[in-house]
Image: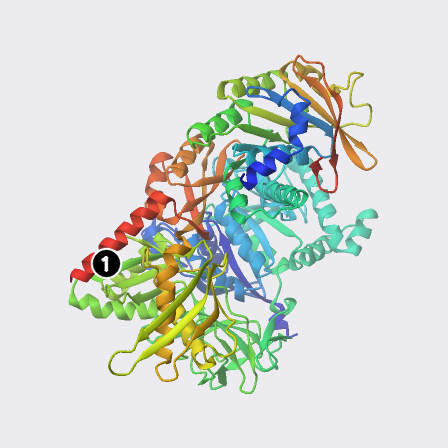
Amino acid sequence: MTSDIATMRNIGISAHIDSGKTTLTERILFYCKKIHRIHEVKGKDGVGATMDHMELERERGITITSAATYVAWGDHSINIIDTPGHVDFTIEVERALRVLDGAVLVLCSVGGVQSQTITVDRQLKRYDVPRIAFINKCDRVGANPVKVKDQLVEKLGHNAVLMQMPIGLEDQHRGVVDLVALKALYFDGPDGEIIRVEEIPAELAAEAKARRVELIDAVSMFSDRLLEAALENRVTEDLIREAVRKGTISRKLTPVFMGSAYKNKGVQPLLDGVVRYLPCPADIENWALDKETEGQKIPLRTDDDAPIVALAFKLEDGPYGQLTYIRIYQGHLEKGDEIVNARSGQKAKVGRLVRMHADSMEDIARAGAGDIVALFGIDCASGDTFAAPGLSLAMTSIYVPEPVISLAIAPVDKKAQDRIAKALNRFTKEDPTFRTHVDPESHQTIIQGMGELHLDVYVERMKREYKAEVSTGMPQVAYRETITRRIEFDYTHKKQTGGAGQFGRVIGVLEPLPGGSFEFVNKVKGGRIPNEFIPACQKGFQSVLRKGELTGFPVVGVKIILTDGAAHDVDSSDMAFQAAAQGAFREVYRKAKPQILEPIMKVSVEGPSEFAGNIFASINQRRGIIVSSVEDGIFARVDAEVPLSEMFGYSTTLRSLTQGKAEFTMEFLKYGRVPAAKAEELVAQYEEKRRQDASK
Amino acid sequence: MTVQTEFARRSPIRDMERHIHGGLGKGNLGVLASPKGVGKTACLVHIATDKLFQDKPVIHVSYASRVDYIITWYEDIFREIAGAMAAEPPLEVHDEVVKNRVIMNFKQEGTRTEQVLKSLESMITMGRFAADTVIIDGYDFSLSRPEDLVKFREFAGRLGLEIWFSASLRGEGPLWNASGTPFILEDFLPAIDVLITLRAEPDHVRLRVVKDRDYPAAGVLPLKLDPKTLLIA
């Protein structure tokens, strides 16, 4: 391993919204001398934080896209990806975690483990990412970092261990005690840039010693040398750090740091923690799949001299063309090198190679194994693997959740029309959870995404970045239909009067397929339906499933078993059997007791306990089922299952019910049955729409 | 007969209820007491699941465990009950049963009884959750006072609920007095209507009724808790 790789860290900063990630990243850039002034996230000084480089991010005070930046801390190089906390932007977090080696989990010292923390933690576990925790905002009223550490244990099941303790909290927060070195750290200077190391204040000495013993107890399981040293009373700082690093990289330990990024406290020790305890690229096993041996796992070597294997994880369309962010897992890249897209087979030559800062870039000649850089002028999709010519490898693809909400958009004028197409083309390439299509009946342009905020942001971006103003319809929920009863069918499609005839008879069974989408089974014997027409039967059934009779939405959960039929020597054809299949389905569908399904969301609401009753009521009013509530005396978190159709406008309602002190997140959970009254309403709406379309 | 009513009819909880004069009854408090790990939570979840099969909503209050652990308990017991009945309940039965259950998790230290009762009442009134029974698991009687239990009993009476508690008995020495009442519950006894203790025996756990309102207590029951299936049988 080259020393470059050993001193490299690729990390993400992940957390719940408003826990201070972007402020923290801003401070990191400042202390690593990447920027020369600190700007607040919500622009108190009129300029937004450096990492939130989109105007919209600055305005709303939220992070939208994941920006990448490179910093140097001591003799270590760190690639940092600042990722959004809101669940509507999960794809950005998924992408970042796929390519990073470690993460900093940021928590608020008052709010602690919140609903989005749980989602992010699940994502970290999915991609086996080691993490350290930073308990931020220790200057806030109600700050309690020890309680938050306990929540990491109780709510997330982490083996969390304090590496520090606070020197004062709330407006008395002055610094932290380093429990490994048993020293007090204070942050002097106008921006906390000067670290003053002192003896621990007398009133904290006993607690510090006790907590250090707890730390050693907790981490000695990762190091026999530390265990022996502890028994013999000769523990050193190096032994503790070595054990903490082993525990963290194995994902069996979460070291916990603390401070206040806003008040410039605790950030530099966190950076020390990143380089000491998070892995370098060579510490992590990475795998690719061999396409020639049907997906056999092949280990990759974090070695500059091995053949190149890299993953494109983010695309950005800018004024100079497409910028492709890549992570190099194996080998190195230089300008002029030839690489092959494993999905399309297309060859490409590496033109410009750049290292990214948030919104500015630095040209480089070469990038090595473990590095994260960007390429210009390479045509590809997010999730594509690039490899050396002759290598038949592909990285596993990034998990992409299905969209749950759609919206019809219409240009306000002709100019907007042309620009919309360009905007949508770019956005869909950048973000696989954002999709668009034209409805074949209404000819409306439909956009689909992960939530109201997700689509709101793209509508706003169309206006600002492409000057394409659109009007939007009501958000449309993606309903489904399904059958609940087994029914037999026997249908003949016959047209034998004048001209070429058509004949096809299909006999079989339609039955529910719980949890599935569609299954077609052919049990026709003796060639009663010639084999050549069986695919046409399947195609016929599939085509009619695309649009259910009750609502026009797709039919799912159906198994069709074809058992018998009949054909005519002359008049049978693919078209005839497709028509027979469609006719058979339409004839028996209603007898199979079809039902309408709607997306059910997992909703998590958090707020002060005093508003728990209002939160319960708000969920009940939305046909929601409360699954659980957790109260710790100050805050309540309520988890519920609520139909998506009932969630529109919930953020406004919740704000008014809780004086703006509660927030919620939601993600798709499952499809559930629509109640009878609602189903009747949907059927009536669809029938009215069909009547109107027919009269046009 | 639906699957649910069949399960309810055949449930051994019916036998348990016969030995406590028809069941706990609305407005009353019941306590299941035993040393740690003997099977109190399993019993409570079995009682709760039995209620759910009768279409009676249950609030499960936990002071001890994470919500996902409690959900796992219910899933395990549901599966065991289905297995014991040699029946495969359809997914709809499971979903219907789960809809009638809400889990509320509190920290006993730092949360007063009034706060807990306020939240429970909010769930029932504002959340429109028409609870029939409240199960309270992990309540530490050593951190509580008899007045607190009186408050729970008043609450049960006012809202027409049955409330079952679990009580963990700790310590090296004798845990119960000559009449079988756990020492830790002696001061709370006036507010407890039904008290059942669980004692571990070689291959099962024996249930014993120590108090049954003003009736003579039934004593050791012919029912036991199977530690493998976690069911009362």
Tell me residue A482's x, y (percent). 42, 56
**According to the image, what is the colour scheme of the structure?**
rainbow
* Residue A113 seen in this snapshot: no
Relative vertical location of residue A257 with respect to residue B172 in this rendering, above or below: below
In the displayed structure, does residue A34 sit left or right of residue A153?
left
Is residue B68 or residue A415 the one in the foreground? Answer: B68
Q: Secondary structure at mark 1?
A: helix
Count residues near mark 1 (Cα–Cα under 10 Å), then give few for <14, some for 14-19, many for 20+: few
Locate the C terminus of chain A by quadrant.
bottom left
Looking at the image, the residue that sits furthest to the front is A497
On the image, the x and y values in percent for residue A664 come to: 42, 44
Residue of label 1 = A690
User: In this image, A263 relative to B106: left or right?
Assistant: left
Q: Position of residue A426 (x, y in %)?
A: 33, 70
At 67% from the left edge and 54% from the top edge, which residue is drawn? A252
Determine whether A198 is above or below A439 in the image: above
* Quadrant of image for the N terminus of chain A: bottom right
Q: Is residue A65 above or below residue B37?
A: below
**From where the camera sits, is residue B135 visible?**
yes
User: In this figure, what is the number of numbered marks?
Assistant: 1
Residue at image x 55%, y 21%?
A: B26
Q: Is B218 in front, or is B230?
A: B218
Instruction: From the viewer's side, name the closer residue of A613 and B193.
Output: B193
Q: Is residue B87 left or right of residue A29?
A: right
Q: Quadrant of residue A126?
A: bottom right
Chain under callout 1: A
Residue A616 x %, y %: 43, 35
Name the amino acid type tagged 1.
Arg
